[in-house]
Amino acid sequence: MERSPNFILVIFGASGDLTKRKLMPALYALYKQNLLSERFAILGTSRSALSDEAFRERIIEGIKIYGDKNAEEHMLHSFSKNVYYLPFDAAKNLDYPKLKARLSKIDDELKIEGNYIYYLSTSPNLFPIITESLGIEGLNKEGNGSGWKRIVIEKPFGHDLESAKELNETLLKIFEESQVYRIDHYLGKETVQNILAFRFSNGIFEPLWNRNYVHHVEVTAAEQIGVEERGEYYDQYGALRDMVQNHLLNIVGIVAMEPPSFFDATAVRNETVKVFQSFRPIKPEETEKYVVRGQYTDSTIHGEKISGYRNERNVSQDSRTETFAALKSYIDNWRWGGVPFYIRTGKRLPTRVSEVVIHFKKTPHHLFTQNNLCDVRRNQLIIRIQPDEGILLKFGMKMPGAGFEIKDVNMDFHYSELSDAYIPEAYERLLLDCMLGDATLYARTDAVESCWRYLDPILKAWKERQDIKIYGYPAGTWGPKEAHELFDNRDEDWRYPCKNLSTDGEYCEL
Ligand code: BG6
């Protein structure tokens, strides 16, 4: 794997959870694998008054908890020597010259030569002022030996189409599109990238990957956790904005895209954008036919009382924010015309699982159903994103013995079987790509806006029409039963997966 060039990574909002839980463990993992240049620095900034030393101690602690639990002290120590801290108020223009001076000092000492990444891990209302202030200080300028400058934006990228457009405008006034990296950590997941490899490096699946053979597609991202400490943010966003607009639609983009002509950022993203542009718009009056929303209510799981959403901290007592959303989407193009894509996500569901299921059409002629010996089942291909990452193909086989009784069997591949396979964390891959200037797995302006364009009418209908129901579901269940009604044919249903990829349909402890 290619090593990063020299760089300084500036993290805005460095005292937050993301830095501790995800960014620093990922940077340390890259360091440990020798994927970071000899000369690099990480400059954390936030309002907390911390010294370099205190910040280093904090991140070492975080790495031990959320990253490499067996990290060796000397490695942690040598990594942390590259970490610096600047107390800084991102909302104050006057603080930016301080940032510039600190950057230039570190740069001179380490001879970085001007390659800077600005990682915005702050509240989204600070994105515009940070961008503009970096521009005022000239910290966006590239060329003439001044190195490269890149800006990474965490989600939420806007609140709706209009605010996403405004944010894009602000960003693109100061930075070129090629400098902007809109991060979606789902695209950094090894198993999501593997969908590309699975589709385009094998001859056997792609011929079947279309409306002639596929009956419907399911994309699920289920979470067992509730909103935890994020009630304030979540109550303004909800599942559609938090998970569907970005993670789930990006997965659909990869599952449904045409093969790109090259494997590079422009070609791949051109193809996913075409998918987003082909989503059949959902008219406000059709919202209930295509979308079901739900909110978890109190329940008891294994004897433990679980609070309903409205009783979570910083959530309004009469909140109508959805913690579950299920959609039936159509992609109106030649490949997918008429094939429904069922998309579902929720918090406080029975288990944490993300997967894509391709349901193939039944055989055109059913030879083995005489005497009602068995049902004709669809073949399913399950691409498991997490946990128990792998791929499962379900198909019918003859039961040994007299007659022709057909039973579904599984052919499965689990990543865990590759004993030497190290599955990198999403942030590792994405941060390294950004250092290397590869934006293939980052979202482009047109992609973000197309996804909002598709979801905006739904959000608008929910906001304006009080008659559109939000269904309660007890925490620990698979969401409101109304989600089942999205299927045209009531014999069809969602897959109810287990933690383990190949034990679905059997009893499993969740
Ligand atoms: C984040 C959402 O983007 O993704 C969270 O804001 C969600 O609400 C998380 O919990 C899920 O990520 P993962 O990687 O645990 O599936």
Image (cartoon, helix red, strand yellow):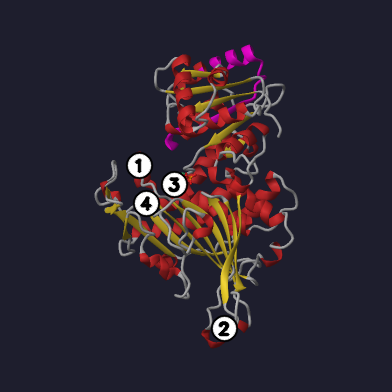
- Check mark 3 vs ligand 1: CB closer than 8 Å? yes or no: no
Tell me if label 2 and label 3 are in contact, CB under 8 Å.
Answer: no
The answer to whether 383 is drawn above or below residue 209 in the figure is: above
x then y, percent, for residue 238: 39, 50
According to the image, label 3 marks what residue? 159
Asked which secondary structure carries label 1, the reply is helix
Seen at 38% across and 47% down, the residue is 225
Q: Does dot 2 land on a helix, a strand or a loop? A: helix
Going by the numbered disc 2, the residue's amino acid type is Thr
Residue 369's label in the rendered image is: 2
Which mark, by number, is residue 348?
A: 4
Q: Earlier in the sequence, mark 1 or mark 2?
A: 1
Over which residues does the magenta segment extend? 99-126
**Element under label 3?**
loop
Type of amino acid under label 1: Glu
For this rendering, which residue is in front, 401 or 8?
401
Mark 3–mark 1 CB contact (< 8 Å): no
- Closer to the chain start, of discs 1 and 4, is 1
Q: Is residue 229 left or right of residue 199?
A: left
Q: Is residue 98 left or right of residue 391?
A: left
Mark 1, residue position:
228
